[in-house]
Amino acid sequence: QVQLVESGGGLVQAGGSLRLACAASGSIIDFITWHRQAPGQQRELVAELAAGGSTYSDSVKGRFTMSRDKVKNTMYLQMNNLKPEDTAVYYCKTEIQSRDFWGQGTQVTVSS
């Protein structure tokens, strides 16, 4: 069974940085997407890391960067120059054999 465990969220002032981690167990992860959901909003895709490269939504492009530690089977989302509108619960997700696996989510709060 694939499990994704997220960590790294917290409270930060605008302009600050956080690094989220998504540790996987049960399978080697080659593909991951990061999503976020703000209160009262739909969950949105913010970044995708696949074999062909990475893509970012316009709202985070230039500020967020994904990376991967193959030894630890962990994916990271480095978030710089955070803005209050980045406040949300952040989730990582992977897909294996047509099944989606989600992390539990981690809260990111950016104060102005």
Image: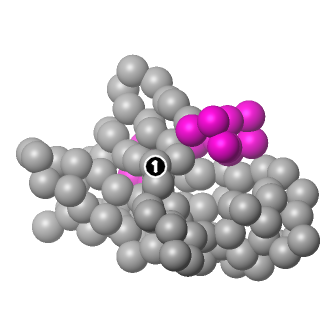
Q: Which residue is drawn at 72% across and 75% down?
A: 109
- Residue 78 shown left or right of residue 27 in the figure: right
Q: Residue at x 79, y 66 (%)?
A: 84
Residue designated by label 1:
45
Q: Which residue is drawn at 46% across and 49% down?
A: 45
Q: Is mark 1 on a helix, strand or loop?
A: strand
**Looking at the image, residue 45 lies above or below residue 24:** above
Q: In terms of image quadrants, where is residue 97?
A: top left
Q: Residue at x 39, y 21 (%)?
A: 52
Chief secondary structure of the magenta span? loop
Q: Quadrant of the N terminus?
A: bottom left
Q: Nearer the viewer, residue 39 or 72?
A: 39
Q: In terms of image quadrants, where is residue 63?
A: top right
The reply to whether the magenta stretch includes residue 77 is no
- Residue 112 shown left or right of residue 101 in the figure: right
The reply to whether the magenta stretch includes residue 62 is yes
Q: Nearer the viewer, residue 11 or 19?
A: 11
Which colour style is shown?
Answer: one colour
The residue at the far left in this view is: 97
Range shown magenta? 57-74
Q: Where is residue 13 in the image (x, y as percent from the top left)?
A: 88, 70
The residue at the far front in this view is: 40
